[in-house]
Image (tube, rainbow, N blue to C red):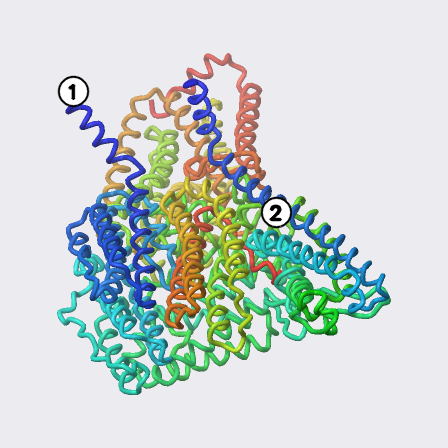
Amino acid sequence: MKRIFLCLAAAALAVCPRAKADMADDFHLLQQKLDSALLDIYEGDLDPAAVRQLNAAWRAIDADAGDGASHALAVTDIPLDDAAARIGESRSLLQHLAALEMLREQRAGHPAEAQGWRVLITLPKFANADDGGILLQQQEVRQPDVTEALAKEYIGWQATRTRQLMDRFQRIAARGDANAACVRANLSEIRTLARFPAPLLQAAGLAVPQKEIPLPALNAPYDSPEAGAALAAWRESVEATLPNLLSTADVDRLERLLARFVELIPKEYRNGVQEGKIIIPLEHGEAVQFTQQAQGLVNELGPVWRRDHHDAYEKFHAELAEKLASLEKRIGRIEPQNAVEANTREVAAILEGRFGLSARRAGAKGQVVEETALEVRSALMNSLAAARAGHWREAESLRLDAYTSFDSEIEARVLPRNPDLGRKTERAFLDGDQNEPGIKALLDSRATMEELSAGYQRALQSLEQSVSLLRVSISPATVSFTAFTIVSREGLEAVVVLAALLAGLRGGSHQASRRWVGSGAWLALAATGVTFWLSKTLIQSLARYGEKLEAVVSILAVIILFMVTNWFFHKIYWVGWNAKLRSLSKADVPARLEWLALLGVGFLTVYREGFETTLFLQSLLLEGSSWPVVIGVSAAALFIGLLGLAIFRFGAKLPYRKLLVVTGLLVVSIMVTFVGSTVRLFQTVAWLPIHPVAWLHIPAWAGQWFGLYPSVEGLLLPPLALVYVGGAWLWVRFHSVRVEPPPLKQRREKSLQPAAA
Amino acid sequence: MKRILAGLALAAMSAGPAHAETTGLQAVKSFLVAQVVKVDAAAHDYEANAAAYQKMIDAAGGDYNQAALANGSALTSLVARMQGDYLNLHMNGYETVEGIAAGVKDLVEFDIYFDSGVPLSQASTDNPAAPVTLKTPDGRVIIDRNGNLFHYVIEACLYGAERKFVKPLNAGASAKLHGIGALPRADVLSASAKDCAREADKFLAASKRWQPTLDQCVGALVWMTPTFNGYFNDLEESLYGDNPFAYISESRVKDMRGIMGSLRLVYNAIDPTLRKKDPALAGQLKSEYEKIMAFIDESDRRDQKMRAAHRKLSKLEIEEMGNQAKTMSDQLAPQLKQAAAILGLKLPPKPILV
């Protein structure tokens, strides 16, 4: 019994939130004690009791840690006579320990615990803490890619902090304020922070440096030229050991991004500020954000420039940082546009003239996410400015530009990773949801500036989350599964429509018709292949028209489906349907083109799905190697093939009329889905307005599978298709009764006989 | 009893975060209104005392020496009461809600008027001029957009920091007042008191009207939290620079406590909603604000200890304190941004810029 209680108690302790609170409290307590003890040392009044408390606080942290590498970092024996150095060291070790624990919890699949350690880590100024947070909210938190991203994020933060600490210490020393204790504490803190534990570097996929960082020989007075030179030399040796997180491609990408930021700052400022007043806070906020991001990038690229453009770095890096800081101040003070533009030109001149940066350099295909996001942001901001000026059509056109870029480069990548986020972001561009209308809905309803700003802000936030998500690569298994799902979903629709068509053409006399429909379907498969190949070359340049092309193909498919539905009702109710169909064909289509109509039916039924599949698969291919896509597509093809075969086999066993009814119902349901999806596409490309139905919540999957979207147009038009079907049924029935006087039973019996029988 | 407790616990649980959020926002507003009621009461008390003071000076025909000789103790007692009013207006009153008032668009005009506005000659977009214009009853200008009401007028007059706001006394009058060499000008006190009471009434009405939102609360945290870094520059300036009045220990520490205390309260309004989505981040932000409060106390303890020993903090100590303060606010800025992103809040621009 005792054992059971003990086990229960242990289990309760294991899940108790108090444990987490203790860990955070212990961490904060140690940090406070370290800070306080250092001030005591500077005051010349360090109490031995304070040192004992420090050691005790370290032991508490050590007890909270679960990683072997973390235990190795714990300092539990700080001596009174060397307290300054050990306190400096402790401050840095505490950071490394929190990072190691964060990774341990992440690898164990405990995102909340990992985040618990992560938020304790001290951040540098201008740090971006969003990305890791978003990664820890994903489902697949245990992925090695997440480990790598978190480790890199941490190393990036602390490399920046190392530089900031060195800047500060050099400043204190140069001012003559440093004493021996200050020197020991700072050198120790900086050296320890720069010396990342091997497990952290390995987790980030970085090499572990073999060389130790020696401490400099610094002698008082610390503001002497000799001490300054020794410190500068030591800084170089520390810099040399800091991990290089940036590959050549990364440097290229960040440099282009920096140039783009600088290019966009005055544009955003011009849109957001007029005559010394902020007229669009969101635009002004973007100018501030771009300036801060540019400062962050200059910091991040600093070590690379120091290596690759040493002379330019020595002469112009400080000036560049200074000019960016003054630009931020000017924007903050709402100075005149001329001043901001002149300042930006100075920054751009240094970047282009001294460091050879240009936004016009082309980027690699796989690294377009951040730049596309920037384009999207810029287009959205211009759209908002146009709306504010009352240029609604221009605002809509710019929104569409933003959406098109988002859709082709970002959304397609986000969907496999986080479908909810992908759809939420898409909706932020279009109709939005119950409480938060999307941009298109707001533009269509000529919303107030405040509502518009809120709508654009929501879209920007979702966009930012999407970009953060894309910093982690996708697992091959997910790629395969996504490819399988896409091809299966699209293939299923095509198979059902084809089955319905071919079922209606059962019998030897329709062999030629079946051949035409079948040829159309095969032709469509071939055309899909060609489209896939072309989409890598020709269509890439037409990417921005992808949605419009899809809308055109969709409307053709809807027309074909209307024809098919119409034909079904004739087939079921018209006695001697074959002759009537022939006469109908003659009436509607010239006889010599009948084969073309049948070919078209087969072709468009399959090609509509093929075209959509192609667009999706291209995006998946951008995410990594082709093999996972090939595996997913092959599995889906097999699945669809078997399913198609089963449907045809099953159909062949069904009584002819029953088969027609079943497939007819399926065709009608697919037609309604097609109409719903096509309405949505038309709204997306701004060929139809959007009027959201705020009180109605329709889950995202209902849109994906049934074409149901909560807008007035999306709810009214698909039922019209049903009205058409119902009308056609009534008309045919009424007409058939008038044409065919025999009793219904007799008529049905006759119609149930396949023509060949 | 157990049942009642269980029922209460159940009720508390079922209330959920939405209720907690409303309660948190309501707590911010209740605190603000309660403090501004005190500010308003102090303003009206100051107005009454200033009127009594004016009456005594007028009774002496505007002659401050004669007034001191005739009613010396009553005058000094009134000055002491007005100084008490000022403490209640400023340190015990406005400073306790400065974090909210200065961080929220709907209330920032009162911050500029009372506490943060600068003279027109020094104004910029992010340091706006205080629109304070005072005139004597006969229409002479006392101050025309030359700084905020608290520091540039009331404090300068009551404590004699501005020569033109006081009347020097002759030796006889000064001896009657136990060596006090000057008295505040009654017309300045009267005009500032009337103005103060009128603006405090408006401030109270605006506070009652204000409906706090989570967006505004996050904005107040983002814009106001870094302000406490600057205190250490002022401390160094007062000890080692040209301006010994840059940091008056008692007032500035109260100032810091007031601002950061009100920000801690503002954070508590966000905490329940954030805790539901990211408990670790919520816990960290809460701890950071607690840490800042403890840090202010610790810094003050060190300063007071040195002052008591007739020593002063070294530049290195002040630098280290400033560094620790900066580390805390640098840590908070991105985490608050992250919290805003998680909660889907839009960060409002700096209130004085809109």
The label nearer to you, 2 versus 1, is: 2
Q: Estimate the x, y position of residue B199 in percent, counting from the top left.
A: 72, 55
Q: Is residue B348 visible?
A: yes
Q: Chain of mark 2?
A: B
Q: Secondary structure at mark 1?
A: loop
Can you give x and y, in whole percent of width and height, for residue A601 in the image? 42, 41
* Residue A622 marker: none
> Residue, x 39% and y 33% (percent of image)?
A501
> The residue marked by circle 1 belongs to what chain?
A
Most foreground residue, B209 or B49: B49
- Tell me the quarter of the picture where residue B326 sits: bottom left
Q: Position of residue B318 (x, y in %)?
A: 41, 68
Q: Is residue A582 above or below residue A138?
A: above
> Is B93 placed left or right of B145 in the picture?
left
Circle 1 sits on which residue? Answer: A1
Inspect the image, locate mark 2, and give the three-letter code of the amino acid beneath it: Gln
Mark 2–mark 1 Cα distance, whole angstroms, equals 58 Å
Residue linked to disc 2? B35
Badge 1 local density, few (<14 within 10 Å), some, or many (20+)?
few
> Which residue does the image show at 77% across and 57% down from the upper left?
B194
In the displayed structure image, the side of residue A375 where residue B40 appears, left or right = right
